[in-house]
Image (cartoon, rainbow, N blue to C red):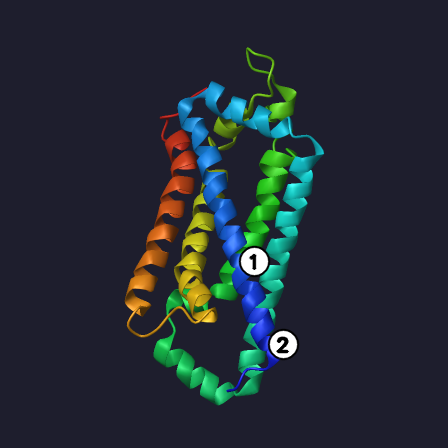
Amino acid sequence: MQMTQSTVGRKVLMAVTGLILLVFVLIHLLGNTSVFVGPDGINAYAEKLHSLGPMVWIFRLVMLAVFAAHIVFGIQLTLENRSASPLKYAQNKKLRASFSSETMIVSGLVLLAFVVYHLLHFTVQVIDPATAAKAHMDALGRPDVYLMVVSGFKSLFITLIYVVSMIFLFLHLSHGAGSFLQTFGLNSDKTLPTVSLGGKAVAAVLLVGYAAIPLFIIAGFLKI
């Protein structure tokens, strides 16, 4: 199937927005790991972010827009591929598809729902107002983000939400890395195994890094 100019444009925009999101989740993970330092680590990190004022919310809104655009482009491309030649698409898909590639739309929508939940939980702080950082101050007079995070992940249900969501992130990124390189013509049959392994490695680092926080808390390694 020959791609139209609009389809090529969508693929490029989807790849670019995906790369932006990948860079963001990597940087966000680095900030989140400050929780392992203890209350002073993550509370100081949160205070630094809040000192940026309105810029923090502008950045969050921009990232949400990038995320929404990424999902819209993904849905549009999937529908275009299926409507162009359903039989041929189904045959090719069975030959080359993996579980992660077949679930890209599902994993993307799950991650969108998770992001909304995550913002309500730790940013807007309405999921558990009793332990919200804005309702408690640490010894230095800073919002006690450490208390909020540790209290939140003492719940097995909330921990499962986060860990399962990170598994979906792993699935999404496992296929996304190869798709990004293929969009810009940087992938081939020879480089496919290496690219696939590299994508899975990055996805695995993010899975372990993000999942370690709630798991360490619920296991009792991080305490209030």
Q: Is residue 157 visible?
A: no
Q: Residues within 10 Å of mark 1 (few under 14, many from 20)?
A: many
Q: Is residue 163 above or below residue 174?
A: above
Q: Earlier in the sequence, mark 2 or mark 1?
A: 2
Q: Position of residue 166 (x, y in %)?
A: 44, 48
Q: Is residue 58 visible?
A: yes
How many numbered discs sit on the rendered protein? 2
Q: Amino acid at mark 1?
A: Thr
Q: Residue furthest right?
A: 54
- Residue shown at the point (38%, 37%) measured from the top left: 212
Residue 75: quadrant of the picture: bottom right
The dot on residue 6 is: 2
- Residue shown at the point (41%, 85%) measured from the top left: 91
Q: Is residue 188 above or below residue 177?
A: below
Residue 193: quadrant of the picture: bottom left
Residue 162 in the figure: left or right of residue 208: right
Q: Amino acid at mark 2?
A: Ser
> In terms of secondary structure, where does tag 1 sit?
helix
> In terms of secondary structure, where does tag 2 sit?
helix
Residue 112 in the figure: left or right of residue 209: right
- Residue marked by disc 1: 17
Q: Residues within 10 Å of mark 2 (few under 14, many from 20)?
A: few
Residue 198 in the figure: left or right of residue 9: left
Q: Position of residue 15 (x, y in %)?
A: 52, 63
